[in-house]
Image (cartoon, rainbow, N blue to C red):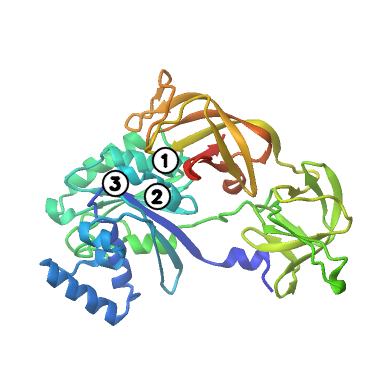
Amino acid sequence: METLDGYLDMDLLRFTTAGSVDDGKSTLIGRLMFDTKTIFEDQLESIERTSRQRGDENVNLALLTDGLRSEREQGITIDVAYRYFATPKRKFIIADTPGHIQYTRNMVTGASTANLAIILVDARKGVIEQTCRHSFIASLLRIEHVVLCVNKMDLVDYAQERFEEIVAAFKAFATRLQIKEITFVPISALHGDNVVNRSANMPWYEGPSLLYHLENVYIGPDSNHVDARFPVQWVIRPHSREHHDYRGYAGRVHGGVFRAGDEVVVLPSGFTTRIRSVERFEGPVEEAFSPMSVVIRLEDDIDVSRGDMIAKPNNQPRVEQELDAMFCWFSPERPLEPGRKYLLRHTTRSVRALVREVRYKVDINTLHKEEGDVQLGLNDIGRIHVRTAEPLLYDSYRRNRLTGGFVLVDEGTNRTVGAGMIR
């Protein structure tokens, strides 16, 4: 039976790759998959054949991840490509995100569940605006481990001086970020230098290869197992005669641990009761924790609806209508301006919301606050104040990603126009 202790023993690393256009993100992932023998022979034959047809000097490993026809034709990554591979030490889920600035929203999507971010820098170009943008987003999204891979070292003659220049420049920028650990690795994804094995071309580099670091970096529990949070997604009440007294609440655990017999409170009503049972498809389970999807049955027949939250009486989320959040704007059609109304989606709730104020915009290159600018354009990041029509049940994003994040939706087009992280 699945228990919390067993879950914490699972060794899975979710990481995202980010960088500017043509920094070699897809090639790096292709190299990791190729050198760890994750791809099949027919896949290798296919990309070898395609590489010859395109006139590439070497096997183009980026073709392993750039799966869309439009991506292959342009030679760029457009969508977030999720890839899976494993070594004897660890399993990995990779989110390969686009480098173009207009796809910043895709980087936010890919990084939102990551434990670690690999940010690539072209050794010839050094730290540029996209490097700063992706690093800032990684910091905002509470990614504690960042690996700066200085790629294409073969094109600068594997020069130690160039690597150290880039490291110094990034360290100077990163002092203003909230990132727990930053690791620097000089690589050539095309030739495999320091990707899976240490490179003979850079004897001056004394650190581990990229794969060794990914296999051994310590990743603490990604989920919050302290604050019990269960947003109700669906009320199950069969109308058959044999199940006429059954009433359960289905959803995904967003934090903490729930067990039969626990005293709980249903919000926003404030009624307290106890858990009768915790169930999955195969039957009752001893306990439920994030990210398990379960059905919780309660001892008392109280009014519970979609969007309500089950928590513990002595540890409740905040219940407020005024939100202060860092926000990334996605829409190219028009900027975010104070006074606009949107649909705000948070956990299992959808409420109308008013953006009351854009407090400042962040200059990505300097991280300075631009307080005179009262609107956010495409891919801008800033701090906003939102008022919702109904109270939200939330935690700060830094404490719980799942209950601290939200998106805004344009009701006219039904498009997601931005993502926020509650302060």
**Quarter of the figure with residue 247:** bottom right
Q: Which quadrant, please, contains the C terminus? A: top right
Describe the element under mark 2 as helix, strand or loop.
helix
Task: Report the front residue among 179 and 396.
Answer: 396
Q: Is the C-beta separation of discs 1 and 2 under 8 Å?
A: no
The residue lying toward the viewer, choosing from 196 and 32, is: 32
Q: Mark 3 or 1, which is nearer the eye? A: 1
Occupied quadrant, residue 81: bottom left
Say whether residue 62 is left or right of residue 398. left
Work out whether mark 2 precedes mark 3 in sequence or the reverse, and give the earlier one.
3
- Where does the image place residue 291, in percent across and percent down from the top left? 61, 59
Residue shown at 13%/50% (left/top)? 156
Residue type for callout 3 = His
- Would you name the residue on which mark 3 appears? 100
Residue on which the image places disc 2: 106
As drawn, 326 above or below 256: above
Which residue lies most toward the top here?
372
Question: Residue 165 at what x, y percent from top left?
Answer: 22, 40
Q: Amino acid at mark 1?
A: Phe
Q: Nearer the viewer, mark 1 or mark 2?
A: 1
At x 27% / y 39%, what residue is drawn? Answer: 168
Q: Is residue 141 visible?
A: no
Query: Mark 3 or mark 1, which has the lower sequence index?
Result: 3
Image quadrant in which the N terminus is located:
bottom right
Of residues 18 and 269, the one drawn nearer to the viewer in this rendering: 269
Give x and y (percent) for residue 314: 79, 43
The label shown at residue 414 is none
- Left or right, 53 with respect to 331, comes to left
**Residue 194 placement (x, y as % from top left):** 26, 61
